[in-house]
Amino acid sequence: MTTSPLLIADQDSIRLIRIDRPDKLNALNSATISALDAAFAEAIADSAVRVIVLTGSGAKAFVAGADISEMNGLTPTEGRDFSLRGTRMMRRIERAPKPVIAMVNGFALGGGLELAMSCHLRIAADSAKVGQPEINLGLIPGFGGSQRLLRLAGRAATLELCLTGAPITAERALQLGIVNRVVPAAELEAETMKLAQQLAKAAPLALRGMLDCVNIGQDCGLEEGLEYESAQFGLVFSTADMREGTSAFLEKRAAEFKGR
């Protein structure tokens, strides 16, 4: 019986997915990529899950990169296929209709940073370091690193991280917009779950609409993005949650959203 590379647990409506290969610093091999793809597909399909938190086991690494021992023997065609599998899995995360938070508890390098960047929000421990060190292996990023980093941090920072391969601190990553928050390592899980709980109480259909708007807007022109936002804005008027939220505001009480 094959042991899963993931630990999965639910805390109320929050699903925690933990990559559990601490002896390999949670490196992404083919089996882990497939397991993540399946785990996210299941979490997205489960109506009881409102927020997904992704992290790595152990104190050292979120994900320290792709598994070099597996990559070393790949042919060019196999290398392309490995890249496509990872890219498709991370695209599933990026397009998830529920908020996905990366809890960056240590090194997020190469494929690890790419995985974190595919999540909607990133909270990093102050001890974490991130980077795209592929140049040191004679490689380039293969899971979308050059593209997502460009969109998050801009051209200059992307070229610096990718061309030099040098990791940066969590604080520097915060300055560049690569992570959203940096917290003391001892408080990382508590702060991440606090944010997850906040999002879990929000209106699920409105969250989905906002995620869709940002995803669409990132890849289209301003006019198309504005039109899409207006369409989504009108659509939420058909939801019971919108009636509940506006009524609760007028009645000065806490709203109870049902995802309908």
Image: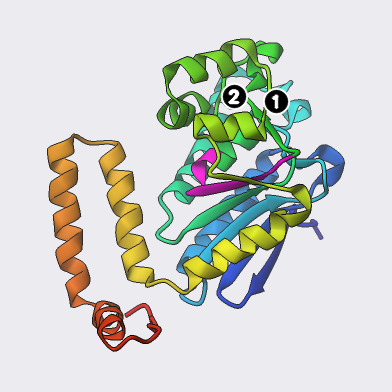
Q: At x 56% / y 70%, what residue is drawn?
A: 197
Vertical relation: 58 (above or below) 222: below
Q: Earlier in the sequence, mark 2 or mark 1?
A: 1
Specify the amino acid type for callout 1: Met
**Which one is nearer the viewer's eye here, 245 or 212?**
245
> Which sits in the foreground, 130 or 198?
198
From this view, report whether residue 138 is shown above or below residue 116: above
2 and 1 marks in contact (CB < 8 Å): yes
* Stretch in magenta: 117-126
Residue 256 quadrant: bottom left
Q: Is residue 54 left or right of residue 215?
A: right
Q: Measuring from the top left, give residue 101's x and y in whole percent.
A: 55, 54
Q: Is residue 77 left or right of residue 233?
A: right
Residue 71 within the magenta-colored segment of the rendering: no
Give the residue pinned by disc 1.
71
The C terminus lies in which quarter of the figure? Answer: bottom left
233, above or below 92, in the image: below
Image position, residue 75 (x, y; %): 63, 19
Location of mark 2 (residue): 79
**Amino acid at the residue labelled 2:** Gly
In the rendering, at what x and y percent does residue 37 appear? 56, 51
Task: Classify 10 Å Cα crowding around label 2: few (below 14), some (14-19), many (20 and above).
Answer: some
Query: In this image, 41 relative to 230: left or right?
Result: right
Q: Secondary structure at mark 2?
A: helix
Number of numbered callouts drawn: 2
**Whole-Å distance between the Cαs marked 2 and 1?**
7 Å
**SS under mark 1:** helix
**Where is residue 172 drawn, in percent x and y?**
61, 29
Q: Quadrant of the N terminus?
A: bottom right
